[in-house]
Amino acid sequence: MKKLPRNVWAVTLTSFLTDISSEMTVYLLPLFLANVLGVKTNVIGLIDGLAETTASLLKLFSGWLSDKLRSRKWLTVAGYSISTLAKPFLLIANSWGAVLTVRLADRVGKGIRNSPRDALVADSVDESQRGLAFGLHRAGDTAGAAIGLFIALIVVAYTQRGAIELAPQTFHILVVISIIPAALGVLALIVGAKEVSLKPSGTLPKFSLAGFDSRFRFFLLVVFIFTLGNSSDVFLVLRAQERGLSVTTIMGMILSFNILYAVVSGPAGRLSDRVGRNRLIIAGWIVYGLVYLGFALGGAAGEASRWTLFALYTLYGAYYGLTEGVGKALIADLVEQEQRGTAYGLYNTVVGVTTLPASFIAGVLWQGLGSFLGFGPSAPFLFGAMLAITAAIMLGIGVRTADQPN
């Protein structure tokens, strides 16, 4: 096996450090909104949806710009820097509007960095190692998340032990700690990564789908179907709290999820280099559908129900491990090098723009429509499971098309 290039390791280290930082607070943020600020679930879903949609629209622009400039590194550095500078403002956010502002700033940074970063990885590695490179990146990213969650778990356990609701001082301590690895991540990228020379293109990249392979357009359609039912993970966290899990147990649950995610990502990426990407994505979506079905059917609050949800959320890590890196590698397979920044931008835009209605629909199903239909808080999870299985079937039907060579 050929040695992976320097850029893959530099980007992986940056993602590792950044996720140590972000995962200390990201899963506690909905609890901060709900427990400390008294924000309702539909507003929490709207905040998350708006933030992710903002990021995704910027991912399209930044990806296109990196193709136009034929430069990936410094856009990536700028994005990580903006997110790092936004973090301290969570210390003074005392309303959902203030939290939304900070989240938007953080997601602006993510929107600027992600598409150029993914294109930098794809441009730096040979096609035969593309799945491995993206799998390693996702494994490093998720290993950082696990460490960040472990730190958060220690802080939560020390400051409030078995409390069901999150205390504001606990959240603020974690925000302060999170600033350090975020800054180190930016430094690692500046020092460790280098630009990759891109071959000149006779035409400027465009925002439209025109000129892209039909297989790429088909993949975007299926991703749209899947994402419409893939509401923010905050609903899984809130469901777990509703079933009686303490803040400490929730942090342990999310930690176990990230450990499995990290363990699966690398081997899944490597396997996709050998057997094809679509098979692993389909498997991941089936796992997702089963997990959501389990969350929908998780009975009344009680010891058995709580540990069932804990186990299901851990299994949720397999879905991410099978799909995240593999999906990025598949996109690189389907488009030309000079189109990759724009392609990742289009993919991220489809995911992000669809996340807004997905999260809003989930909030409405949870609080109002679900009860009216007799499903209650189970409704958004049933909806997500149904669309996941639909998307898996669609991609299965289109496997032959997606596997055809260019």
Image (spheres, helix red, strand yellow):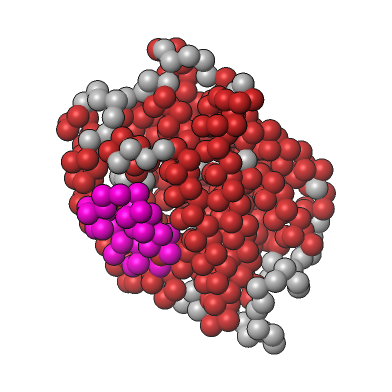
- Residue 260, percent from left and from top: 46, 35
Along the line of sight, the residue nearer the viewer: 282 or 242: 242
Specify start and end residues of the magenta stretch as a single range.
79-108
* In the image: residue 248, left or right of residue 367: left
Q: Is 259 included in the stretch rendered in magenta?
A: no
- Look at the image and tell me in which quarter the C terminus lies: bottom right
The N terminus: image quadrant: bottom right
Query: Can the viewer see residue 238 in this picture?
Result: yes
Can the viewer see residue 133 in this picture?
A: no
Q: Is residue 101 above or below residue 268?
A: below
Main SS category, magenta section? helix
Residue at position x 58%, y 41% in the image: 361
Task: Tell me where residue 345 appears, x and y as whole percent.
Answer: 58, 65
Is 346 situated above or below 315? below
> Is residue 284 positioned above or below 276 on the image?
above
Front residue of 139 and 162: 162
Residue 114 shown left or right of residue 35 in the figure:
right
Question: What is the count of numbered marks?
Answer: 0
Residue occupying the point 42% across, 76% down? 74
Closest to the observer: 197 or 62?
62
Q: Position of residue 210 (x, y in %)?
A: 76, 72
Q: Residue shown at 48%/40% (left/top)?
A: 42
Compared with 296, 303 (above or below) is above
Q: Residue at x 26, y 58 (%)?
A: 89
